[in-house]
Amino acid sequence: MEYITKDTHLDFSTDDGTTYKELYGLNGYPDMGSEPEQKEVTNMRDSNKRYIAGLTDTGNLGFDFYYNKETAEDSGNLVKKAFAALKEQEGKLINWKLTYPDGSNYTWKGKPTVYITAGKVGDVISFRLSTTVESTLVYSDGASA
């Protein structure tokens, strides 16, 4: 079965990753991983160039959100004032989880940076969350054990 991005969400945890809060307004997410660099290992006996996989560089992960100053209270684990909540966490190492509609997800640890993105007349105000990746990016298929 194929899926669309509807119901994809980004959550963060300020404890050890046991309690996550969902950030309201997500409208774009990055590639979750990268290809390893190629390292040439051709020697004098080879008739063709040979390569092995080197390190991967995920860089920072950037997520796009709609900015809001929601007046309604947060409900359950949904953080409606996502920009303000993330501003409070800037520079702190926290846990992240990007969950897809089928329950599969990526988790990692990283520090957030948030900023309002450029806009033009009539545009919706947006912000960008950039997280460092300070752990292994772990994929889970979402199946319960």
Image (cartoon, rainbow, N blue to C red):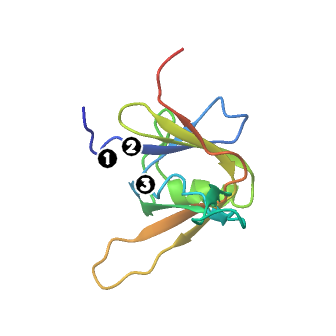
- Looking at the rendered image, the quarter that the C terminus falls into is top right
Q: Find the residue positioned furthest to the bottom.
A: 121
Q: Amino acid at mark 3?
A: Glu
Instruction: Tell me the distance, in whole angstroms, between the alpha carbons under discs 2 and 3.
Output: 20 Å
Q: Amino acid at mark 1?
A: Thr
Mark 1, secondary structure of its residue: loop
Q: Amino acid at mark 2?
A: Thr
Image side of residue 46 versus residue 93, left or right: left
Q: Where does residue 38 sit, x and y in percent of width and height?
A: 61, 63
Residue at image point 36% right, 31% down: 102
Q: Where does residue 121 sit, x and y in percent of width and height?
A: 30, 85
Q: Is residue 139 above or below residue 49?
A: above
Residue at image point 27% right, 39% down: 3
Q: Which mark is residue 70?
A: 3
Q: Are marks 2 and 1 in contact (CB under 8 Å)?
A: yes
Q: Would you say residue 68 is visible in this rendering?
A: no
Q: Where does label 1 land, which residue?
A: 5
Q: Where does label 2 land, which residue?
A: 8
Closest to the observer: 11 or 60?
A: 60
Closest to the observer: 81 or 51?
A: 51
Instruction: Identify the mark nearer the N-term, 2 or 3.
Output: 2
Q: Is residue 14 above or below residue 114?
A: above
Dividing the picture into quadrants, the one containing residue 36 is bottom right
